[in-house]
Image (spheres, coloured by chain):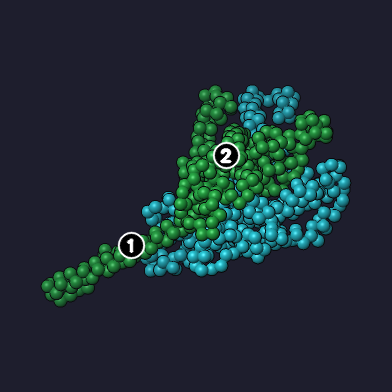
Chain colours: A green, B cyan
Amino acid sequence: MTDTAFPGTIDAPVGTEQESARLKADRRQERRAKRASASKQRRISRFALTIFLIVVSVVMAMPFVWMFLTSVRSSPEIYSADMPLWPTEWHWENFTVALERAPFGIYARNSFIIAAVHTISNLVLGSMAGYALAKIRFRGASVLFGFILASMMIPFYAIVIPEFLMIRFVPFAGGNDLFGQGGTGWYDTWWALLIPALVSPFNIFLFRQFFISTPTELMEAARIDGASEARTFVQIMAPLIRPGMLTVALLAFEAGWNNFLWPLLVTSSTNLRTIQLGLSVFRQEAGTEFNLLMAGTTMAAVPMIVMFFFFQKQFVNGFVGSGIK
Amino acid sequence: MSTNTVDRQTQSAPPARRRGATLTQRQGRWGLLFAAPATIHIALWTGLPVVVSIILSFTNYDMLNPPEFSGIDNYVTLANDPVFWKALGNNFIMAVVGIPISMLISLALAVMLNQGLRGNSIFRTAVFLPHVTATVAIAMIWLWIYSPGGNGLLNIVLGFFGLPNQAFLASPSQALPSVILVTIWQGIGLKMMIYLASLQGIDQQLYEAADIDGASAVQKFFRITIPMLKPVTFFILVTSIVGNFQTFDLIYNLTNGGPANSTTVITYQIYQTAFQQFRMGLATAQSVVLLVVLVVLTIISRKVTGGKDD
């Protein structure tokens, strides 16, 4: 910015015309040289910066590279005292061995079902509530919004025990009587995995923000045309916030796929384990066989990484907008 | 709503007004209808548990026998429990050490990225990836990187420089710093993206005006960039502290709180007390402490950022 010469410089008055011409040429040359050196300097610093950023990227990505490289190493190699950085042989069968030792397919299926259900339920329930709070005037709306804001502050770890007890003591479920006694309630069932996280207050808040910036005129026009409130919402208003829907969908899916604590608490059977829980359990199984553990880790991590590559912009916008994981 | 119906019957308002009333009435009903499912769900699965948590924290409860009222016994127990204080202290150390470091790194990276170099997006992807990846997977990777034998990546690097092998997670003195390093690595991406977004929001005219006044790049950074980033810095700080107090997956999978409680955190204590020792009353008292800390932090941040949520 500062390195380009100011175009409107006024030449100082000089004696003869010849002299002035020579001076002008000199100055031009000087200026050009200065500019060249400045831009050269800038190029060098940009080059250095690029190199630096490449180094940082490599350092940041290294754990993932290391995970992958380990997942294809042979067992003797990971136990050897001087393990080569690059695997000498590529043992892809580590993945099949890991799949034989633990049903990662079932784990992945379970996680996918949970993530998909929570995505859909957050989209439907969250957008309905967000729309009502942003666009419809009704009694108690402000109280309701205050309630949503307050719920957003509650950390999951502060309510996890009562939530667990509620699952355990659901009446008439899992052999329970009316008072939730005698059986196991929803413990170790799909209900326990799916119901408590159907909609998060934060997603309602996000939807409210998205709907606030939509034009109310469209809504009114639809009403005047005789559309019902439900139709106005589904056909006119909801399509307006498609990018927002994608953001919430990605956040909800990520939360479902990466969730660990809740499945750890409410499931005990292998068939209901999620991928992250399954990976955590597999660690005991694999023991020191880190090549197998890293093969399992790769399987648990890759779907989210692939999704991130596809929806990078939406992911980043969603997380930056929320600021919280 | 019901009062409106009564109004109509008793006062017999003019038809025009009546129709207006029914329209807003109808709308109001739809508003409640739209909001009801989510609200009921949150009241049941967030609101009710908060109340239950607070009530149970004043009881003795083991899930087998009905809860017994015990006054503030649980809180007294916590106040005298060195492990609980250790957990709080570890959370505090993680916040005080880890957050400023990762904030500084992410600010520096964001400023560099803001220069508009080529390959920007590849770089962003690499830095942001740890944030998207499940913490359990990340814990597994670092478990292997920190492997105390000669085959852990970090020990290979140390060996390259002629340094002796370290125990890392197995050492009571190195475990917490090792955990903090992972949280820094995992946390940089999001902070950097927030900083970057806010850097791009700074009015370019400020810099142009400074150029005209002959300000140097360093001056511009400290006199314009830093002050303009103050609100977002505060925002990142608070959300990071809130996130830090909810670290669980990493501790559970990386260290189990050990060795010798050197890496235990408040959430891990809640988990152990409730689901390994089944002292539900004591565990809910711990979770109420966590709740109070985080709610106070959040309220402060909302006040300071000027109720931007609204």
Q: Can residue B148 be seen in this view?
A: yes
Location of residue A59 in the rendering, given as x and y in whole percent from the top left corner: 48, 57
Left or right relative to A84: residue B57:
right
Q: Is residue A189 above or below residue B96?
A: above
Residue sitting at x 38%, y 69%: B214
Marked residue nearer the N-terminal end (1 or 2): 1
Residue A39 pos. (x, y %): 30, 64
**Residue A37 placement, left or right of B241:** left
Asked which quadrant contains residue A190, the reply is: top right
Amino acid residing under circle 1: Arg
Judged from the image, the secondary structure of the residue bearing numbered disc 1 is helix
Distance Cα–Cα, label 1 vs label 2: 51 Å
Compared to residue B118, the image places residue A238 above or below, namely: above
Q: Residue B99, located in which quarter of the rendered image? A: bottom right
In-front residue for pair B255/A209: B255
Chain letter of the residue beneath label 1 in the structure image: A
Does A194 sit above or below residue B101?
Answer: above
Per the image, the residue denoted by label 2 is A99
Q: In which quadrant will I find the N terminus of chain B?
A: top right
Task: Find numbered disc 2 in the image and state the secondary structure of the residue it sits on.
Answer: helix
- Quickly name the residue at label 1: A43
